[in-house]
Image (cartoon, rainbow, N blue to C red):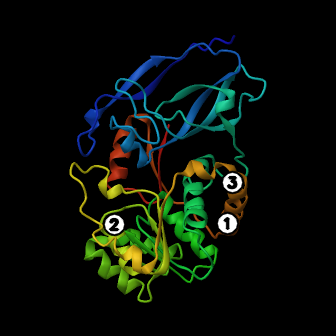
Amino acid sequence: MLSVPLRTREIHLESRPDGWPTPDNFKLAEVDLPVLDDGQVLVANRYMSVDPYMRGRMNDVKSYVAPFQIDTPLDGGAVGEVIASASNDVAVGATVLHGLGWREHAVLDAGKVTVVDTSLAPESAYLGALGMTGLTAWGGLLHAARFKPGDAVFVSGAAGAVGAVVGQIAKASGASRVIGSAGSPEKVARLKELGFDAAFDYHDGPVSASLKKAAPDGIDVYFDNVGGEHLEAALSSLNLYGRVAMCGAISQYNSTEPSPAPRNLALLIGKRLNVRGFLVGEYADKSAEFAEQMAGWLADGSVTRDETVREGLDQAAQAFIDLLGGANTGKMLVKL
């Protein structure tokens, strides 16, 4: 047994949001860390991730992942340094990826952490392009959407963590045209710097009109992070045998009323479209293949990592709220 005489801070879910979350839904708590059992490690978290899917876990509803519980710490992706170990498999000093974010320290079984190579990429990359974010983009585009060279690809939420990587993978893999939507002129400009052939601000008018202008010959693949009006517009622009990979629907996460869109689902019939929802866990068995490809793209500059970083655990709740409001470019992280 190894005694760890430390206290730490963590974020608890104070109450369930009704619509948009507010800071009052979260509580910063100070707690004792337990003594390490055999086979466990203590990690000092360096970065934690806030992600849109976490909003769904704040609702007390049955879903593909268990809801967060009131008066208990939230969790999510984090990367940090092992500062104490009662395991023969994970040494003190190792940098590890794990699932107990929203706290400054985490005690985990050694089998629940993954040692990462910080000589290959900075530690924060393992929460973004080299982590779940990148695997989501890669698996959704290449497998769920069955992308093939020559496809024209439209990505919604394209300046976000997943969307930006999707567009760059599409370009690196031979897309004929890549179009992205984003929420500000600055984000549109950034997408063009990342190699998108066209991009538009969805605030500038109906998404359907903006998309038709950006893709006059239609699209073959739509990677959906937004849902609602974006999905409706994409269905109108998809060519025969077009494919949709449904990753998220952030436009609806905080809604208290059902979304009326899309209203044109009948287009699936005549166009013979394929709409496929997916979860990143489906591609866990392909993670080694993904990591090899992504490491190559990062090394040769085909994929660039954008990060928006907030400092300190006490900023985590606001970082999450701001993420849902589109304040991030690329991956939203909290540095601890």
Instruction: State the residue in front, 272 or 223.
Output: 272
Residue 119 x/y as whole percent: 73, 50
Q: Residues within 10 Å of mark 3 (few under 14, many from 20)?
A: few
Q: Secondary structure at mark 2?
A: loop
What's the CA distance linking mark 2 and mark 3? 32 Å
Between 145 and 331, the one nearer to me in the picture: 145
Residue furthest left as drawn: 257
For label 2, the crowd category at 10 Å Cα-Cα, with few meaning under 14, some 14 to 19 and many 20 or more, is: many
| Residue that label 1 marks | 297
Secondary structure of the residue carrying numbered label 3:
helix
Disc 2 marks which amino acid?
Answer: Gly
Residue 292 picture quarter: bottom right
Image quadrant containing the N terminus: top right
The answer to whether mark 2 and mark 3 are in CB contact below 8 A is no
Q: How would you rate the neighbour count of disc 1 (Cα within 10 Å): few for under 14, some for 14-19, many for 20 or more? A: some
> Mark 2 near mark 1, Cβ–Cβ under 8 Å?
no
Q: Which mark is residue 183?
A: 2
Q: Position of residue 265 (x, y in %)?
A: 34, 70
CA distance separating discs 1 and 3: 17 Å
Q: Which residue is mark 3?
A: 286
Q: Earlier in the sequence, mark 2 or mark 3?
A: 2
Kind of residue indicated by mark 3: Lys
Type of residue at label 1? Trp
